[in-house]
Amino acid sequence: MTKVHTPVTDKMDFFKESTPVQLAEKYGTPLYVYNENILRERCREMKGLVDYKNFSVNYSAKANSNLELLKIVNEEGLSVDAMSPGEIHAELAAGFTADRILYISNNVSADEMRFAVDRGIMVSIDSLSQLDLYGRNFPGTKVALRFNPGVGAGHHEKVVTAGKKTKFGIAPEMMSQVKEIVKKHDLTVAGVNQHIGSLFMESDAYVKSTDSILSIASNFESLEFVDFGGGFGIPYRKSEGQKRLDLSETGRLLKQNIDRFIKAYGREIKIKIEPGRYIAAECGIILGRVHSVKENYGSRYIGTDIGFNVLKRPVMYDSHHEIEIFREKGSVDISKDCVKIVGNICETGDILANDRELPKIVEDDIIAVLDAGAYGFCMSSNYNNRLKPAEVLISPDGSDKLIRRRDTLEDLMRNFEL
Ligand code: LLP
């Protein structure tokens, strides 16, 4: 195999014994490939973030809920959050016990709340209207409340989930109504949580928001936990030298806020965080094949099988994912081309990487899209009746195994009465 352009995966020893060309031949493309070592390493980094004995990490499974990956996260001793009965279902199947799952509901029916309550899973509620619904259905139980700390952060306006322009959380100004509803239904507020948004590379806003949520928390006497939420960013521009989030400084600042709160609160409680992207993003790569190279009115298009049905982030948020190039055999022309890497979906917006400077790409090359482990497969779809990709795991011993098979044409038909 010829490595045409592989600045990042070489350093990470991502593919171990396999090569992208072999994996593409064995399993077909597009293909999600995960590296188990990297997943475990990220779990451990998050577990060690804050030096506080009751600190724990809930992996936010929305980032990637592949059953095998969830099992690894469970083995690493993390807990999880869930956004839907479907996520709860997968988490229980992966071996998480009910006490290690938090259901962070948003605009759900009483039946969905019941799905969690019946299984002994704590529900977090994020509006007065849902709190009243919860109270009417489950009086006398414990509940968690999601507040909006007033500070938001995120890589795109669509993923900022606190502050004044979002549907999420209860505004702290509504505290007296919250307390009335809690009293009316004899509820116990056992937790307060927040999530300010997704992807920060500087921790200032996050740390500031923990101050707000901790001061909100001091309104409740019977707390078992405060959950600071997720949002920890990863460097998507590694080959340009982008720095990692400074975890030790973030942990130190969080510890100061926690210590101050615990002292004032008068007893120890659990402090949780909810990272999704940080745990899953860097352990995942998508392999795709180049099927055409074409010039169209001055632009050079590299046509691949990675459409936005496979990876939605570039189309939805203008997200940048680095691209590497592998060739079965042949020489490398290192002079750079400015190219648009596109997929096979019938929309002009189906662009994976726009105006990228890369060494010359030819038909049949394998391209790798980096940092695709979070919000990759889970946001993929069957648009254009395309088949969802297979997923493969590279184990620490270097072997590869299929952890989700590719969709089949029968899968596309299975919900129809034929
Ligand atoms: N907790 C809650 C309540 C959340 O809504 C989220 C993410 C997280 C935790 C985890 O956030 P993370 O640590 O992964 O930033 N699809 C977007 C990201 C959406 C995030 C949604 N909520 C993307 O591809 O960038």
Image (cartoon, grey):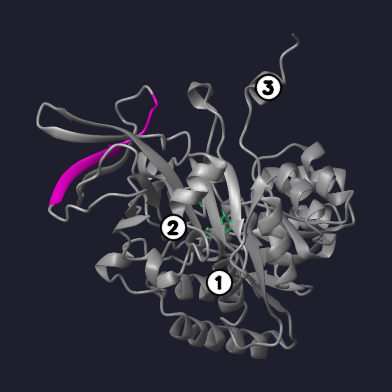
Say few, some or many: other residues with alpha carbon within 10 Å of mark 3 (under 14 / 14 to 19 / 20 or more).
few
> In this picture, is 78 found above or below 378?
below
Image quadrant containing the N terminus: bottom left
Pointer 1 residue Cβ closer than 8 Å to ligand 1: no
Q: Which residues are magenta?
A: 336-345
Q: Residue 149 in the image: x percent, y percent?
A: 52, 63
Crowd class of label 1 (few under 14; some 14 to 19; many from 20; radius 10 Å): some
Indicate the amino acid at tag 3.
Glu
Please give left or right for residue 73 compared with residue 7 in the image. Answer: right
Q: Is residue 219 visible?
A: no
- Magenta stretch: residue 400 in it? no
* Disc sitting over residue 216 in the figure: none
- Say which amino acid is labelled 2: Asp
Q: Which quadrant is the C terminus positioned in?
A: top right
Q: CA distance from mark 1 to mark 2?
A: 13 Å
Q: Which residue is mark 3?
A: 410
Residue with the mark numbered 1:
42
Q: Which residue is mark 2?
A: 371
Q: Marks 1 and 2: CB-CB under 8 Å? A: no
Q: In the displayed structure, does residue 70 sit left or right of residue 159? A: right
Is the C-beta separation of discs 3 and 2 under 8 Å?
A: no
Sequence order check, earlier mark of 1 and 2: 1
| Residue at the image position 58 percent from the left and 62 percent from the top | 194
Helix, strand or loop status at disc 3? helix
Q: Earlier in the sequence, mark 1 or mark 3?
A: 1
Residue visible at 70% across and 72% down in the picture: 76
Q: Main secondary structure of the magenta part?
A: strand
